Image (cartoon, rainbow, N blue to C red):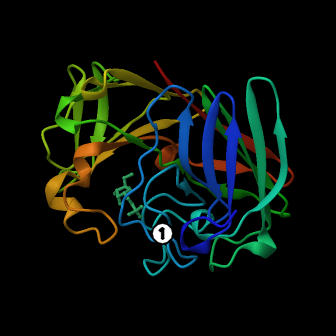
Amino acid sequence: IDGLGSLPAVAVAHPSATALIYLHGAHVAEWCPTGQLPVLWMSALSRYSTADPLRGGIPLCFPWFGKNATDATLPNHGWARLAEWTLISAESGADAAELTFELTEQSVGVPDGTAPMRLLYVVTVGAELTADLQVINTADRDLTFEEAFHTYVTVGEITATTIGGFENLPYLDRAATPEATGVSAQRVLFGGEHLERIYPMPALIDVDDAAQSRVITVVAPASAQSVIWNPGSVKAADIADFGDDEFTSMVCVEAANVLDGAITLAPGASNHMTTTLAVR
Ligand code: TA6
């Protein structure tokens, strides 16, 4: 179908859930299990243009996370979320629909990091949502990259939301200047400030969305790190495609292989990173 901004998208209508996935960035923008409130958050100010990443849903960060280490003019979080992916298969089973998207080197429009590679992205839409990114090194040399699912979930009120799964674990505090380290003595709480933490552990997260009386779980067994991010009022005001008050209704719970968790593939080798979202 033609999504917003006439960007091509795949609309999934399965008895167990609905979803909307843009070919731009193979970007899962919407997922709603039947009988539940929508789970993914999208900014009302998101751009729907091939020049920009969508703001919300599940942005694919690849082949680097954040700023490019060598060229600051390159797009934040890499080029996979800016590329036009191809839907190569769509199947519907009793419990879920399964869609496979592909991106190969010749379809990548953004410079740097375009060593020959093939990305296969399988999204399973059902009562749970699973995303599986497979990277295949089709080059004749080692390929090193970072990758992350930058997942935005929607919550009723961020200050009434807590995140469990990191109790007594250390984190890198990226909201501190300079960056600092900390330990989460308890569940992660939000007070409207900029919160950005990288925990060196696979995501086994529960988001207690008390305002909407539900718990969203995010599991990512093959991720080296978990990133929690809320821009808070100050940082949100600096982000053009992020409404000033929108930070109160979202939190990013990201599965990542970044920093010392970056992946290196030998020629012909491949890896999978998956994340599974569920609501109860
Ligand atoms: O995951 C947190 C983060 O790295 C923040 O630093 C912030 O930049 C956020 O991602 C959003 O990045 P984006 O390029 O999508 O605006």
Residue 23 in percent (x, y) is at 68, 62
**Residue at 44% of width from left, 54% of height from top?**
56
Residue 130 in percent (x, y) is at 64, 34
Is 206 rendered above or below residue 265? above
Q: Quadrant of the N terminus?
A: bottom right
Q: Depth check: 228 or 177 in front?
A: 228
Is 245 rendered above or below residue 15? below
69 sits to left or right of 229: right
Is 124 rendered above or below residue 248? above
Element marked by disc 1: loop
**Residue at 65% of width from left, 70% of height from top?**
83
**Residue at 55% of width from left, 66% of height from top?**
78
Residue 164 in percent (x, y) is at 33, 21
Say which residue label 1 marks: 68
Q: Could you classify mark 1 by the number of other residues whose Cα lies within 10 Å: few (under 14), some (14-19), or many (20 or more)?
A: some
Q: Amino acid at mark 1?
A: Asn
**Residue at 22% of width from left, 37% of height from top?**
157
207 sits to left or right of 211: right
Q: Is residue 51 visible?
A: yes
Answer with the quarter of the image where residue 116 lies: bottom right
